[in-house]
Image (cartoon, grey):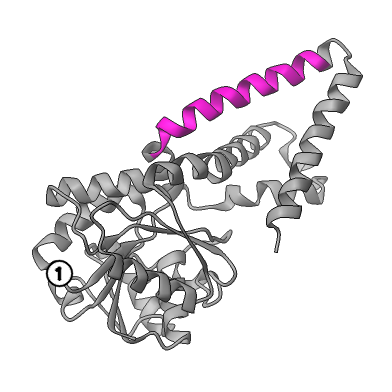
Amino acid sequence: MFKRLCVIGTGLIGGSIARAARAQGLCEEIVAFGGREKNLPNLQLAQQLGVIDRFYTDMGQALAEADLVIVATPVGSMRNIFELIKPHWHPQALYSDAGSTKGSVVAAVEAAFGHVPNNFVPAHPIAGAERSGVDASQADLFKNRRLIITPLENTDRQFVEKLSNFWRQIGSSVSLMSVEHHDTVLAATSHLPHILAFTLVGLLGRKDEQREIFKYAAGGFKDFSRIASSDPTMWQDICLANKREIIPLIQQFKAELSHIEQLLTNDQAEQLFDTFTYARDARQRFLDTFDD
């Protein structure tokens, strides 16, 4: 059990981490930090909902006696956050994050400290929801979901094990991989799909007949477009942070769309059928292998 969990960023992810930790009795006290006046209503709501016990606008007070600190802010703000944390860093505390890109987070820590402290353990919970904000947080958001830890060469393995145990106790399946491999995999499985959903919904939303389009949209459209309800600020930061991995995927996807366009233009029914069949079978292999 941790004495004090400090969550920096009490939105959907940070709030859900706090709720899950409380539900499992993993810490005696949960506090939060919010350094801007615009964050106060969300922090006050988090306290009213019982997600946190108290909050601070001073980083030193928030981190005092905290032995577990999790940064759950958008990845674009990480450098500023770690610069605020630096004067109060304690070598015996465990520090982690919940960012969707790991290369940018590690770079933010290096920029703030000049190196990555061995008690910082980068992590990424593979979970989310349509709504954002602390009022959307759920104690079971991470149950039966994957949690990726990306330790560096100098990361203290005792802290890696501590963090792994924390996430396992709130229901996550923990995996370890390199920072680079994480960003490559997530670009394909999460970042590109979000871009596609945002783009398609934006395209249809700008059409003059948008009311008719959305009125008659089938369930498949609702399922695919669900992730376009995600927080734009968070996804702006993610896409910019991992653009080196995302841009080649966009180019490959454009080539695939052009191929489909040519098949349609030339009435190549058999080739179109083969393309769709391959995709269907590939998805079924994924379900057979990984679906719980």
Chief secondary structure of the magenta portion: helix
Q: What element does badge 1 sit on?
A: loop
Question: Around disc 1, counting alpha carbons within 10 Å, would you say few (fewer than 14), some (14 to 19), or many (20 or more)?
Answer: few
Query: Is residue 243 on the magenta stretch?
Result: yes
Q: Is residue 89 left or right of residue 250?
A: left
- Give how far across and how far down residue 276 sits, in percent: 82, 32
In this view, the residue in front, 263 or 152, is 152
Total marks placed:
1
Query: Is residue 247 on the magenta stretch?
Result: yes
Residue flagged by tag 1: what amino acid is it? Pro
Q: Is residue 98 left or right of residue 155?
A: right
Q: Image point 38% across, 54% down: which residue?
A: 150
Residue 51 occupies which quadrant of the picture? bottom left
| Residue closest to the far top | 266
Tag 1 residue: 91
In this view, the residue in front, 111 or 115, is 115
Q: Image point 42% across, 75% down: which residue?
A: 165
In this view, the residue in front, 148 or 221, is 148
- Image quarter where the C terminus lies is bottom right
Q: Is residue 189 left or right of residue 32?
A: right
- Give how far across and how far down residue 185 sits, in percent: 51, 43
Q: Is residue 9 above or below residue 216?
A: below
Residue 60 occupies which quadrant of the picture? bottom left
Residue 63 occupies which quadrant of the picture? bottom left
The residues colored magenta run 242-263
